[in-house]
Image (cartoon, rainbow, N blue to C red):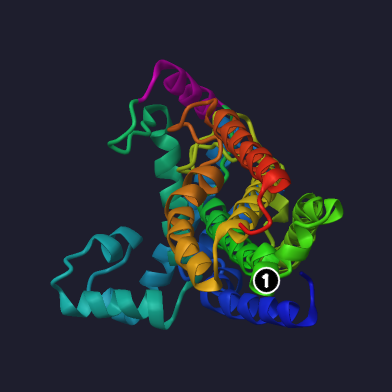
Amino acid sequence: MLNVKLLFLLFISNFIFYFLFIQFNIENFPNGRPANDEYRILKEMKHSFGKTMDENEYEAFKKSYDERILEANKYLQLKEEAVNLGITTYSDLVQGNDENEKLSNLRYKIFHEEGVNVFWEIQAQNNMIEFYKYKDDRNYDNGDVFITKDAKDRFKEITNNGSYFSSLIFDNYNELIKYTVFLIILSIAIMISPLFLKDRQNKLVYLQYSSKIGRDLFKKKLLGALIASFLLMTVQFTVFFILYSTNDTYIFFDMNVSSFYNRFTSWFDLTFGEYIILTVAAAYLLGLIFTVITAFLSSIVPNYLTIIGIQVPIMFVTFTYVLKYFIERLTEITLSAYFLHISYTILVFVILSIIVIRWKKEKRIDILY
């Protein structure tokens, strides 16, 4: 499986996929403003408050917000263009009439041309303060989920846990891990597809099925495929986390991902580091499951065109639904608390059943089949 041609093909496909779907979220994090300012403030909070923020620390946070408002007011009072328009406070600037062309031009100049940090920082802090003020009224209902009593109780726990972990960090990681896992599954499909198909096309199956040793090759090939897939995933995850480390999010690894400032809510008290470990473990399991599925297809299809035709809809369903529920929404409160355990147990059971059924068929398959 791991021959030079295949490794070269995997390298090229991974390289292209990285630049198309992964590079942007690695090199452009945080993306724009006020995301950059929010991330800078979050790092300041982490160094000052630790992994949680209590009421006293929240008051200190509001005080720094008020100080920034005063700094912005002072900036406007010293700016001739603003004074001539009667704009002397931050609220005058952002709440003024949008139809006033001169005011709109001034606002654009301060925020975009001059890029004055304090004005962007105020927006970032104000957003967090608003989330904190209404954290007791948190209601995660996206229209297709019935919020149970257990879920409401869980929301109350999160309200009091003090975590201020941000969706900015969480969404960036989730987007990256989704595409990385999809790339892994694509790579496995490329690597494993010829596993049995190549021998059938070369007529080696007649020699294989005419001997006891040959019939045992199914198990050995499948084991080899699982080992090769595991090694491939390990290399890909190693490269991914080397690249992801440049996003400098490691200081948030000890923070609870369920917070008043993160749209994602978990049934469990997972830190960001633990959530990363969980997604990687789930990805390994999915990768091995898809290895078995691809090996099974390789053992029954007549040619490469057929296996590609079967895998295209499988990949579509995987990207659209499987990754959504088995990677991006792991332990999410809008799903059952037991969804992770039950779904993966069912998947493993189905895959083991496929292996057993196919192995039994291999043992008694006719040589002219």
- Residue nearest the observer in this picture, 258 or 57: 258
Name of the residue lying farthest toward the right: 213
Is 122 placed above or below 191 here? Answer: above
Q: Which is the main secondary structure of the residues drawn in magenta?
A: helix
* Residue 203 visible somewhere in the drawing: yes
Q: Position of residue 302 (x, y in %)?
A: 54, 66
The disc labelled 1 sits on which kind of residue? Answer: Lys
- Residue nearest the observer in this picture, 258 or 33: 258
Is 306 placed above or below 365 here? Answer: below
Task: Please tell me which residue is depicted at 61% across the width and 78% down the height of the picture.
Answer: 13
Region of the chain picked out in magenta, as a range: 147-160
Residue 158 highlighted magenta (yes or no): yes
SS of the residue at dot 1? helix
Instruction: Left or right? Give the position of 317 relative to 108.
Output: right
Name of the residue lying farthest toward the left: 99
Q: Position of residue 343 (x, y in %)?
A: 54, 34
Task: Please tell me which residue is depicted at 42% across the width and 54% down the height of the picture.
Answer: 320
Task: Please tell me which residue is depicted at 58% across the width and 37% down the height of the picture.
Answer: 350
Q: Position of residue 143 (x, y in %)?
A: 27, 36
Task: Please tell me which residue is depicted at 13% across the width and 72% down the height of the picture.
Answer: 99
Q: Quadrant where the C terminus lies?
A: bottom right
* Residue 192 visible somewhere in the drawing: no
Instruction: Write down the residue under mark 1.
Output: 198
Instruction: Left or right? Give the position of 238 relative to 119.
Output: right
Is 122 placed above or below 305 here? Answer: above
Is 299 placed above or below 7 here? Answer: above
Residue 224 highlighted magenta (yes or no): no
Q: Position of residue 168 (x, y in %)?
A: 52, 55
